[in-house]
Amino acid sequence: MKNDKRLFYRIDVMMPCSFRIVSHETLDTDVLPSHPDSKYIEDYFMKDLNELDDQISEVISQINVKSSLLASALSAMNSKLNFMMQTIDADQLTRAIPQRLVNLSGGGISFVVNEHVDTRNKMDLLIHPISSEKPILVRCDIISSAALSKDDDAYRVSLQFQSLPEEDRRKLVYFIQAKEIEQANQARSTES
């Protein structure tokens, strides 16, 4: 499926969008639930932070060999960050999803990443189009990953949603229609 042949309306819009690449080798063991709750979403996207925390702890222990004072300072900073992360609730976490310019439709999404993505892999997206609603966690097929230019490390990925629940698809279509109306109203006010 080409990027320009996705179902429904398409629109370029800024929205909260985070992603994780799921290797084609681990697809059988790394399965998303059909209706993930906010705790699952928090744990799923916090997994990267936990892995990073393990790496930080390893580096601090290596630094401790050379300078126990520096290692103590870094450990204290790491503990403070861990404490702050533990006090973040699910609502705050969804507000922390980075804003990204996307091309969105009810059937898929396209955006720019800083790495080439193997189309055999899948991508899990956490998107939050409507702030008053729960975020959407969906697995996507990677349709294409194309470099923007020869000299750039930026790639446009085009994704097709897999098994998006109808309730979430309605949220996306509603969001797209609301943005289209907003853009039309802005165009009319500019013409006046």
Image: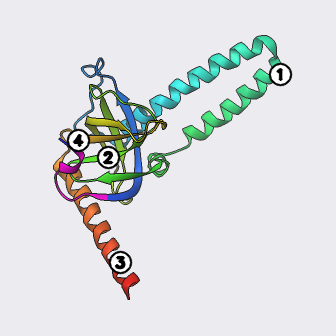
Which residue type carries mark 2?
Ser
Q: Position of residue 72 (x, y in %)?
A: 77, 23
The residue lying furthest to the front in this view is 150
Identify residue for label 3.
187
Q: Which residues are magenta?
A: 3-11
Question: Residue at 70% across / 13% down in the picture?
Answer: 62
Question: Residue at 40% across / 42% down in the picture?
Answer: 148
Which residue type carries mark 3?
Ala
The residue lying furthest to the bottom in this view is 192
Q: Position of residue 114 (x, y in %)?
A: 46, 36
Closer to the chain start, of discs 2 and 3, is: 2
In the rendered image, the quadrant that contains the C terminus is bottom left
- Mark 1–mark 4 distance (CA, rounded to whole Å): 50 Å
Question: Residue at 26% across / 25% down in the picture?
Answer: 120
Q: Position of residue 70 (x, y in %)?
A: 80, 23
Closer to the chain start, of discs 1 and 3, is: 1
- Mark 3–mark 4 distance (CA, rounded to whole Å): 30 Å
Identify residue for label 4.
160
Q: Which mark is residue 110?
A: 2
